[in-house]
Image (spheres, rainbow, N blue to C red):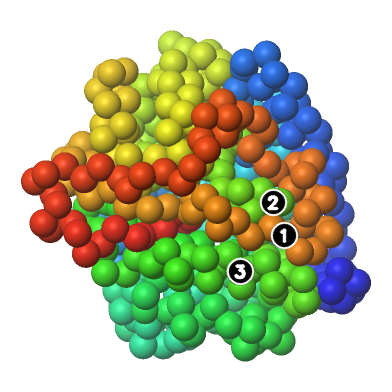
Amino acid sequence: MVFSLTSRILRTTDPRILARFGWNFGVKGVRSIQRFKKRARRGEYFPAFLYISILNSCNLRCQGCWVDVDKPQVKLSLEDLNRVVNDAKEHGNSFFGLLGGEPFMHPELFDFLAEHRDCFFQIFTNGQLITEKKAKMLRQLANSTPLVSIEGTEVASDERRGKKGVLSKTLRGLDNCLNEKLLTGVATSLCQSNIDELLTEDWLRALIDRGVHYAWYHTYRPVGPKIHPELALTREQARRVRQFVVNARARMPIALIDAYYDGNGQALCPMTTGISHHISPTGAIEPCPIIQFATENVRDRGQDGVYAQITGSEFLRDFRETAAKHTRGCIVLERPDLVQQLAERHGASDTTLRRTAMAELKSMTPRGSQWQPGDEIPEKHWAYKLAKKFFFNDFGAYAEFDRQTAAPPPDPVVPCEQQAKGAGHASGVLSPK
């Protein structure tokens, strides 16, 4: 499997892109994680991987989206973006995730990428705005990998994305990337309307035949102003996703990413470990993209750089420690009451444009997440197992929690006023965008 995947990537990817990926994500990325671990040992947390939502605008209207895509455009300026990335680079970072909205709607995206050829960027996109010209520009810059979101077949895609003809336009953008020999991935948010179509070997083989290099299965998160709880996966389906990914990794020549399990199949949360935090289009420094509260903002010129803001944030520290004390899963899904308490205790601002984040928290029904104690599924393939052992694990964040937890957790405590309306939706699962 490793030989076949490596051979395919070498044959179908521009050598300059591979060289920059290998250096900036590989060599420098490993250094960044080592520096992260060294800082963490002295209680100083600055994430090895920053995820930046560069604007709120999007050309689609997806079910369950928590981004204010229907509001007037708000974006991080080129100056803001450069300041954040330059500060992070000074502390060893070289890999960044770019989200939106739709990143290709940002008028200065390519100027930003050109400014930082010593970094590598993963661009989360629906692919529809990646024209042949833009794909050629990405190839020339040679420092990014588009991660194109596909949400199902034609009917399912239109329903999930809120427009007609979504799949064909997305595939056109995907093919433009592959034709230009970009290192290219496909992401899918698994939910009730697409799990049977896309969680299959046939789908992965179709991606391989098309030339896609890696895939990332997320699971739908019922958060935001329009939750759509009917789309959430059940506990059994969540386990099915994990088992499928572990099995497919061992036998299919396509890289499969996940961000919520270690090599032994133990659940974890990147925010809780401190390996990742999020910057919103308004500049707010948030624990993660779905926790839309903050006490720091990168636009605050009265503060030192983003490194000092994150490492000195009592809000982020309390969030990590509180989450680690209560669950290996998602604190938002399992304990929205704790998220509410944390925001209130620190006087955190609502970072949404709609200004309803607190009301949304109060209306949430607690549900399960990726943490399913006693039902762990370890990695099968040696390469994934080795990589996670050294470079992606819980970094000791749950040591106290693991010592104190001798049995599966009790069912979440549901407030009385929510019991009736929430009883039928207690098994959704979290994963990243």
- Mark 1 highlights which residue? 379
Residue in the image at 69% along x and 51% along y: 264
- Mark 2 highlights which residue? 264
Residue 263 at x, y percent in the picture = 71, 51
The residue closer to the viewer here, 321 or 424, is 424
Residue 320 at x, y percent in the picture = 48, 28
Say if mark 2 contacts mark 1, CB within 8 Å: yes
In the rendered structure, which disc, 2 or 1, sits on the residue that comes first in sequence?
Answer: 2
Q: Total marks drawn?
A: 3
**Kind of residue at disc 3:** Gln
In the rendered structure, which disc, 3 or 2, sits on the residue that comes first in sequence?
Answer: 3
Residue in the image at 40% along x and 71% along y: 191
In space, the residues marked 3 and 2 are separated at their CA atoms by 13 Å
Q: The N terminus is located in which quarter? A: bottom right
In space, the residues marked 2 and 1 are separated at their CA atoms by 6 Å
The residue closer to the viewer here, 338 or 61, is 338
Residue in the image at 29% along x and 74% along y: 162
Few, some or many C-alpha atoms within 10 Å of disc 2 (few <14, some 14-19, many ≥20)? some
The residue closer to the viewer here, 14 or 209, is 209
- Determine the secondary structure under disc 1: loop
- Mark 3 highlights which residue? 243
Q: Quadrant of residue 355?
A: top left
In the rendered structure, which disc, 1 or 3, sits on the residue that comes first in sequence?
Answer: 3
**Kind of residue at disc 1:** Glu
- Determine the secondary structure under disc 2: loop
